[in-house]
Image (cartoon, rainbow, N blue to C red):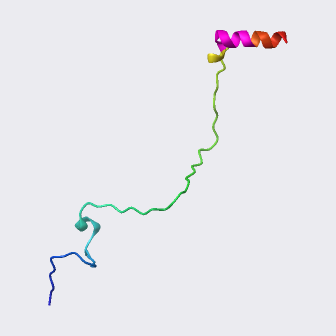
Amino acid sequence: ASVNTSAAGAHTHSVSGTAASAGAHAHTVGIGAHTHSVAIGSHGHTITVNAAGNAENTVKNIAFNYIVRLA
């Protein structure tokens, strides 16, 4: 005998067959805080230091550096 209800209550659904027969869907599982690391092997980095520097060459900083050198 089969029972049909028109109200949702505690119940389950089962799908037999393959995942494709269940239609497009996704599952999400919370796994908490974690990290991943990837070994990238031996490698190098190149840096360039410009003679003019950066924002340190403002008039204010040039004057301050001059005063410090006088002290």
**Residue at image coords 53%, 57%:** 33
Quarter of the image with the N terminus is bottom left
> Which of the 4 quarters of the picture holds residue 14?
bottom left
**Residue at image coords 64%, 12%:** 58
Q: Is residue 63 magenta?
A: yes
> Which of the 4 quarters of the picture holds residue 23?
bottom left
Residue 24 shown left or right of residue 63 in the figure? left
Residue 44, above or below 21: above
Residue 4, above or below 42: below
Residue 52 in sight here: no
Q: Is residue 10 magenta?
A: no
Residue 48, above or below 2: above
Percent coordinates x, y for residue 3 in the rendering = 15, 85
Quarter of the image with the C terminus is top right
Q: What is the chief secondary structure element of the magenta stretch?
A: helix
Q: Residue furthest right?
A: 71
Residue 26, above or below 1: above
Magenta span of residues: 57-64
Percent coordinates x, y for residue 20 in the rendering = 25, 65
Between residue 37 and residue 67, name the one nearer to us.
67
